[in-house]
């Protein structure tokens, strides 16, 4: 859906087309080394087309409501009510 946040992740090795090649199966080679030379171009396009921020920033207000903190305070665990000591 347009305007909704999403998560983007890439492995660090995916941006190094000059990385050493491991002696692995043909399927692993296909998965790990195909199109490595295009990754920089793809990342640059994503950075131009979309706005990125840490996930904490994206969900700051929602997280603050869940953790009993104001959006400007940063995050902290929710308050846990004190449990009376057994007598």
Image (tube, helix red, strand yellow):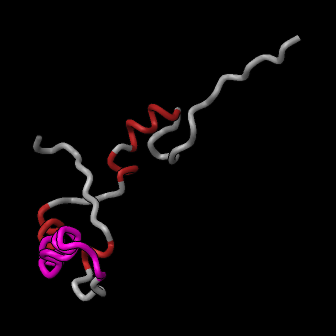
42 in magenta: yes
Q: Is residue 86 above or below residue 19?
A: above
Describe residue 35's horizontal placement relative to residue 13 as left or right.
left
Residue 85, given in percent of the width and then of the height, sits at 83, 18
Q: Is residue 75 above or below residue 21?
A: above
Where does the N terminus fall, quadrant-wise?
top left
Describe residue 83's horizontal placement relative to residue 39 as left or right.
right
- In this view, the residue in front, 20 or 58, is 20
Residue 19, given in percent of the width and then of the height, sits at 29, 85
Residue at 14% in and 75% down? 34
Residue 76, given in percent of the width and then of the height, sits at 56, 42
Where does the C terminus fall, quadrant-wise?
top right
Describe residue 24's horizontal placement relative to residue 63 as left or right.
left
74 in magenta: no
Q: Residue furthest front?
A: 25
Q: Residue furthest top?
A: 87
Q: Is residue 56 above or below residue 35?
A: above
- In this view, the residue in front, 69 or 30, is 30
Q: How many marks?
A: 0
- In this view, the residue in front, 34 or 58, is 34
Magenta stretch, main secondary structure, is helix
What span is in magenta? 22-43
Describe residue 70's horizontal placement relative to residue 83 as left or right.
left
Residue at 27% in and 84% down? 21
Residue 27, given in percent of the width and then of the height, sits at 18, 68
């Amino acid at each position: 859906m347009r305007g909704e946040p999403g998560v983007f992740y890439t492995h660090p090795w995916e941006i190094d087309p000059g990385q050493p090649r491991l002696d692995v199966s043909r399927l692993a080679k296909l998965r790990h080394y195909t199109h490595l030379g295009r990754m920089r171009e793809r990342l640059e396009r994503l950075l131009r087309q979309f706005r990125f921020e840490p996930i904490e920033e994206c969900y700051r207000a929602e997280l603050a409501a869940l953790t009993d903190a104001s959006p400007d305070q940063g995050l902290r665990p929710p308050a846990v009510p004190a449990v009376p000591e057994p007598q």
